[in-house]
Image (spheres, rainbow, N blue to C red):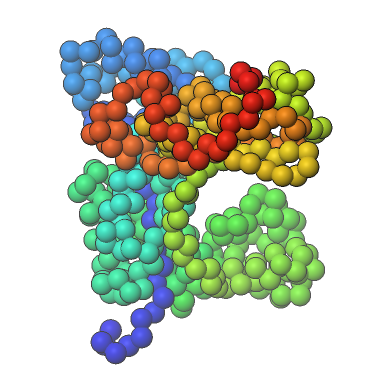
Amino acid sequence: MSATAPAIRRIAHLDMDAFYASVELLRYPQLKGLPVVIGGGRRALDDALRAQYAELPLHEIPVAAFPLLRDYTGRGVITTATYAARQFGVGSALGLMKAAKLCPQAILLPVDFAQYRHYSQRFKAIITEIAPLMENRGVDEVYIDFTQVPGGQREGGRVLARLIQKAIFDDTGLTCSVGVAPNKLLAKMASEFNKPNGIAIVHDTDVETMIWPLACRKINGIGPKADAKLKTHGIETIGQLAAKDLQWLMDTFGQRTGAWMFDAARGRDERPIVLESEPVSISRETSFERDLHAVRDKAELGAIFTRLCEQLADDLQRKGYVGKTIGIKLKYEDFTAVTRDITIARHIADAKAIRRVAGQCLKRAPLHKKLRLLGVRMGALLSVDEAQALDFKSNQPATLMDIALTAINTGADDPLTGQLF
Ligand code: DCP
Ligand code: MG
């Protein structure tokens, strides 16, 4: 490429290989090359194994000591499987007992989301150091804009893809696969072409040869329902889809979907890379079926309040956040609203702790009017990893007694609040 040639849009899709399983193999490298599946609620068993071999480092626990799929009973499903296990036809979403029939000798390990989140954050941090325009698509995949990044145009993006793969592997020991293409739609398909540890490059001119032979389901957005409908019209491949005219597609699938399918079959996709914006706060709220009074409906209100705190705690834990500003929102029967919040000294995400602090907030809000809505919010968010580092450094006490220390924005107390919550 000459120095004056305009940059061609190059978008990469990067997807980690057998992600959960590969993370498990980092601590149990003795299982490398063996069929391993991840799933089921067997954390207790894993703990038992570690307790039994407490004197040994994890990587020295003998392979023969690991639980096998053939001994599993229960209703759990596989989250993922190593490539060695996939050869037996087992993989994501398959029931563990069904999988045991196909590959009884596979080793079964329980899921450890905290560990996967940790590695997820790590590989993404490495990518953004090299290529800052990254869109988060979930725990193990991202889109990256290669267009303006050094090496992003060389060999269609292969040079930069290789560099990123190497940087991730050097830091984490994990492999990934990358597709580089003119847009997200094609990049997503391409990242699957050479899995695992592969790179695939697609140009506009490759659509006919590389994309049209694929099944329609390979288009991200054509799900089982649309696929079944396409099949009833004899359309199996993307090439067959591309042979249909726009009007027919719009008549059959509706204007929007039909037009989208028309473009997708031609490998056209203009969607921009959406940059990560970390949430400032996470909240849960609910409006009541009838207005509730703090005294007369105390039990009902208390139960709803507790439920909201549990849901908020769930959201936080699922997304890997903790926070230290707990707030409530109240809307009254006359549609006026108030908020109260308290900032505590440590970051938390646990339902009981949230409930206690939120209860303190509620005590500071007027409660003589009936309520139509109640909300609970967590602000001052940090990722679990960041918070651990920070709270450890500042050596804060582990108790909740310190919540009274740093109350802010609590407004005037209302004499009617009493000891309700
Ligand atoms: N996952 C899950 N349940 C599913 C599918 C996936 O829990 N039905 C989890 C486990 C995977 C992770 O999400 O490790 C990433 O999903 P992928 O589809 O990218 O699958 P893998 O990374 O495991 O394998 P591949 O190498 O095919 O990408
Ligand atoms: Mg993956």
Residue occupying image coordinates x 51% and y 64%: 185
Q: Nearer the viewer, residue 191 or 299?
A: 299
Residue at the top extreme of this rendering: 52
Percent from the top left, x then y, of residue 238? 59, 65
Residue occupying image coordinates x 79% and y 32%: 291
Q: Taking the image as drawn, is residue 147 in sight? A: yes
Residue occupying image coordinates x 27% and y 66%: 160
Question: Height in image: 319 above or below 154?
Answer: above
Percent from the top left, x then y, of residue 188? 47, 59
Quarter-of-image position of residue 248? bottom right
Question: Height in image: 35 above or below 246?
Answer: above
Residue 378 left/right relative to 2 = right
Residue 150 left/right relative to 236 = left
Percent from the top left, x then y, of residue 186? 48, 66
Q: Nearer the viewer, residue 192 or 350?
A: 350
Q: Taking the image as drawn, is residue 90 in sight? A: no
Residue occupying image coordinates x 66% and y 37%: 330
Picture quarter with the N terminus = bottom left
Residue at the bottom extreme of this rendering: 4
Question: Height in image: 359 above or below 238?
Answer: above
Q: Nearer the viewer, residue 12 or 352?
A: 352
Percent from the top left, x then y, of residue 180? 39, 66
Q: Nearer the viewer, residue 293 or 396?
A: 293
Picture quarter with the C terminus = top right
